[in-house]
Every structure is written in structure tokens, then in C-alpha cells.
Image (cartoon, rainbow, N blue to C red):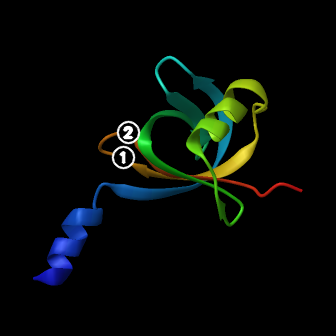
Amino acid sequence: MLAGFALVVTFGLTLAGEVEFLKYDKEKKELTVKEDGKEATYKITDDTKVKRGDKDAKLPNILKFFEEKAKEGAKFEITVDKDKKAIIELKLPGKK
């Protein structure tokens, strides 16, 4: 019974793995990426968790990075809720 519940709870979650940055729409708070050779757009919510390397990061700082500095093709990892088309966690490489 518990295993069935766990399956239902995690059904919508998918680790998208590594994706490539294409663009960020500040007004809609949507991130467009290339995953598995296809373009996909996901919402960023106030609940989206962000990491820079292994350290927690602040969402406003990451959004500013996407607005001003991110280059098309930059690679990072996302975990998404495919049903809601929303990013649950976003992990950028650590700073060098």
C-alpha cells in the first residue's frame, strides 16, 4: 500500500537531467531549455529550489543571472513536475 502511494506521489516528477539554456522570460517567469534535443519551457515558481554546485542559492540571484549573464547553450540540471510544467529544483555548476 505504501509503495503504491509513493508511486502516485512521485509520478509527475521527472529528473530531466542536464539541459541547455535557451532563454528566460522575466515577465512569465518561464525558462526555455533544450532537453533530449527538443525545446521545452517550464515555469519557475517561488517554491523552486536552486543550487550553485552543492550549495543552496537564492532564487532572485539565479533569475538575475538568467536575465543578464546566461549564454545560450549553458548546461545545468533541472528536476521538473511534468504535469505542472514547473521546475522543482534547478542546479547550476559551482563557481570557479
Name the disc covering residue 46, or none: none
Q: Nearer the viewer, residue 21 or 55?
A: 55
- Which residue type does callout 1 highlight? Lys
Q: Are circles 2 and 1 on residues that touch, CB within 8 Å?
A: yes
Name the disc covering residue 85, or none: 2
**Residue lying at the far top of the rendered structure:** 27
Residue 9, image x, y percentages: 23, 64
Residue 60, image x, y percentages: 59, 36
Quadrant location, the C terminus: bottom right
- Which residue type does callout 2 highlight? Lys
Tag 1 secondary structure? loop
Q: Cα distance, mark 2 to mark 1?
A: 5 Å
Name the disc covering residue 82, or none: 1
The structure residue drawn at horizontal position 65% and vertical position 40%, both measured from the top left corner, is 62
Badge 2 crowding class, 10 Å Cα cut-off, few under 14, some 14 to 19, many 20 or more, is some
The structure residue drawn at horizontal position 67% and vertical position 31%, both measured from the top left corner, is 64
Q: Is residue 15 left or right of residue 54?
A: left
